Amino acid sequence: MRLLILGGTQFLGRAVATHACAAGHDVTCAARGLAGPIASGARFVCVDRDVSNGLEPLARQEFDAIVDVSRHPGQVRRAVAALKRQTAHWTFVSTVSVYADNRTPGQRADTAPLRAATAPEIEDSTEDIYGAAKVACEQAVGEGALICRAGLIVGPEDPTGRFTYWPARLARGGEVLAPGPPDDPVQFIDVRDLAQWIVHAAQARLTGVYDGIGPTLTRGQLMAECAAALGASCTLTWADRAFLEAHDVKRWAGPRSLPLWLPLPDYAGFSTRDVTPARKAGLQLRALSETARDTFDWYRASNGPVAGLTIEEEKDVLAAWHARR
Ligand SMILES: NC(=O)c1ccc[n+]([C@@H]2O[C@H](COP(=O)([O-])OP(=O)(O)OC[C@H]3O[C@@H](n4cnc5c(N)ncnc54)[C@H](OP(=O)(O)O)[C@@H]3O)[C@@H](O)[C@H]2O)c1
C-alpha cells in the first residue's frame, strides 16, 4: 500500500508508520514535524493543517489508504475535502471518549449512544470538549470509512506516562499503594497491537465503527501480571476511594494521581467495552507481560515520562493509611 498518515510524529501515528514500514508498505507521514521524529523508512511531508491550503503539498499524490489521528474538527474537515476519494481507504482514529454513557458495562461501538458533537463553527478541540470534538470529526469523515475508537493506549514511547507509572513503580519494589478495590476493571491496548490492526484493517479495506481496545482485566490482575513479568518483589496496599480522595490523590492521570484509577460506579462502562467485534475483525493482542516488560525497558533506557504520585507523596499517603483508625 501507499499509506498516508496524517500525523506520524507522535505515539500512535509513529507506531502505525513503524509497523507499516516493517510490513513493506510505502509510508508517508504528513505533519508539521514538531511533535517528534517519524519512523525510520517513512517519508516526511511538511503540512500545516490549521491553514486552509495547508495540505497542498499532498495535492497531486495518490494513496491507497489514509490514516488520520487528528482531534480537531477543522483539520479533519479540510483533510476530507482535500484528500478523501473513492479509491483510498480512510481510517479515522477516534476515542472511547465519544460515548455519552460511562456507567453501563459491556457496551458495543455500533449501538452505544454518543455525546452531542461540538457546534459546526468549532474548529479546534481542547481537553474539555475532546469527546464532543471527536464526534464532530467522525461526522466530518462520514460513511465508507473505518472509525477506530481507541481506548487507553499504552506501551513503549507513551508520552503521557500513565500506564508507565505501574511497571516503574512495581519494579521499584517494597510497599506499593494501589487504588482499591482490586476487582475494579481496567482496559487498555498496547500501541503496537492497535497500530498493527490499523494497518491490517486498511489493507483489508475494513469499514464501520469499532472500539480499538484490549480485554477487561481487574486491577488486581494488572498489578499481579505486571509484577510477575518484571520479577518485582512488592506488597500491595489497597486503599479505598474515600481515603484516597480525602488525601487528595487524583484519579486517572497526571501529578499526584494513581494512574488508571477511575472509581465505580461512575466509570463501570468506561473500562468494560465489548471488544468482540474488533477481535473478529482481526485485532490481535499481545500478552500483558510483554507490554509491561517492554514499557519498563523503554522507560529505563530513555528515562521516559511517568505521571503519578512521587516517591515522597506515596510514602506520605501510605503513612496516613497505616495511621488511620
Ligand atoms: N493516548 C491515548 O491513550 C488515546 C486514547 C484514546 C484515543 N486516542 C487517540 O489516538 C490518537 C493518538 O495519536 P498520536 O499518538 O499519534 O498523537 P496525537 O497527539 O493525536 O498526534 C497528533 C498528530 O497530528 C500532528 N499535527 C498536530 N497539529 C498539526 C497541524 N496543525 N498540522 C499538521 N499536523 C499536525 C502532530 O504532529 P506535529 O505536531 O509534528 O505537526 C501529530 O503527529 C489520537 O487520535 C487520539 O485522539 C488516544
Image (cartoon, grey):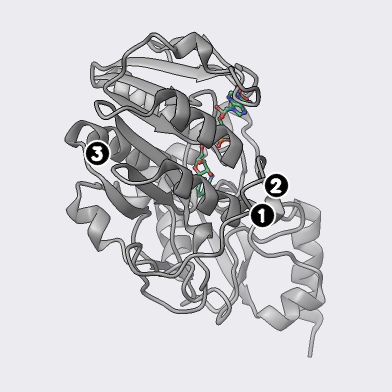
Amino acid under disc 2: Thr
How many neighbours does mark 3 have within 10 angstroms: few (below 14), some (14-19), or many (20 or more)? Answer: many
Q: Which mark is residue 51?
A: none
- From the top left corner, tell me how far across and down residue 19 is, in percent: 32, 26
Amino acid under disc 1: Ile
Tally of marks: 3
Q: Mark 3 or 2 closer to N-term?
A: 2
The secondary structure type at the circle numbered 2 is loop
Residue 325 visible in rendering = yes
Residue positioned 52% across, 36% down in the render: 77
Q: Answer whether labels 1 and 2 touch (C-beta < 8 Å).
A: yes
Measure the C-alpha gap from mark 3 to mark 2: 29 Å
The secondary structure type at the circle numbered 3 is helix
Q: Mark 3 or 1 closer to N-term?
A: 1
Residue holding disc 1: 129
Residue holding disc 2: 126
- From the top left corner, tell me how far across and down residue 68 is, in percent: 45, 33
How many neighbours does mark 2 have within 10 angstroms: few (below 14), some (14-19), or many (20 or more)? Answer: few
Q: Which image quarter holds the N terminus?
A: top left
Amino acid under disc 3: Ala
Q: Quadrant of ligand 1?
A: top right
- From the top left corner, tell me how far across and down residue 233 is, in percent: 52, 56
- From the top left corner, tell me how far across and down residue 161 is, in percent: 62, 44
Measure the C-alpha gap from mark 3 to mark 1: 28 Å
Measure the C-alpha gap from mark 1 to mark 2: 6 Å
Q: Residue farthest to the bottom?
A: 325
Could you tell whether 271 is left or right of 201 in the image? Answer: right
